[in-house]
Image (cartoon, helix red, strand yellow):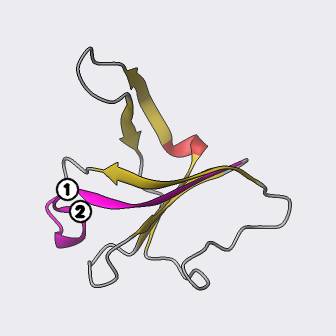
Amino acid sequence: MSLNTAHANGGVLIHAGESILLFTENVEIDFHGKDEAAFKGRKTGKLYLTTHRMIFNNKHLNDPLASFSFPFVTLSQVELEQPVFGANYIKGKVRAQP
């Protein structure tokens, strides 16, 4: 897991051997369980799904959370929620890396 990693011109830098599988805009992300300012409130931005990880880039440049990246191995308790009234969403826990 990494917070505010360096990316190029609003895009993302990917590792050797990594490929982007899916890109989507206007994704909303919420964080629970952390009291740090960077994790407060709902964030809107771009989401990149790669062969190794997920990368979120915040649309608001002045927000303390500019980007959030995590490899799939840090995910646990992943659930796909499909409410009757509302958009589908994924929720889960991301374990911090040393």
Query: Residue at the right extreme?
Result: 17
Q: Which mark is residue 49?
A: none
User: From where the camera sits, is residue 84 visible?
Assistant: yes
Q: Which mark is residue 39?
A: 2
Residue 70 in the image, given as x and y percentages of width and height:
52, 55
Q: Is residue 5 magenta?
A: no
Amino acid on which the number 1 mark rests in the picture: Lys
Amino acid on which the number 2 mark rests in the picture: Phe
Q: Residue at x 58, y 80 (%)?
A: 7
Alpha carbon of mark 1 to alpha carbon of mark 2: how far? 6 Å
Q: Residue at x 62, y 84 (%)?
A: 8
Against 36, is 52 above or below? above
Q: Earlier in the sequence, mark 1 or mark 2?
A: 1
User: From where the camera sits, is residue 98 visible?
Assistant: no
Against 9, is 22 above or below? above
Is 31 positioned to the left or the right of 17 in the image?
Answer: left
Give, as a single range, the part of the protein colored magenta.
34-50
Looking at the rendered structure, the number of numbered marks drawn on it comes to: 2
Is 26 positioned to the left or the right of 24 in the image?
Answer: left
Residue under numbered circle 1: 34
Assess whether mark 2 and mark 1 are in contact (beta carbons under 8 angstroms). yes
Residue 80 in the image, given as x and y percentages of width and height:
42, 23
Dot 1 alpha-carbon crowd within 10 angstroms: few under 14, some 14 to 19, many 20 or more: few
Who is closer to the viewer here, 31 or 47? 47
Residue 30 in the image, given as x and y percentages of width and height:
26, 50
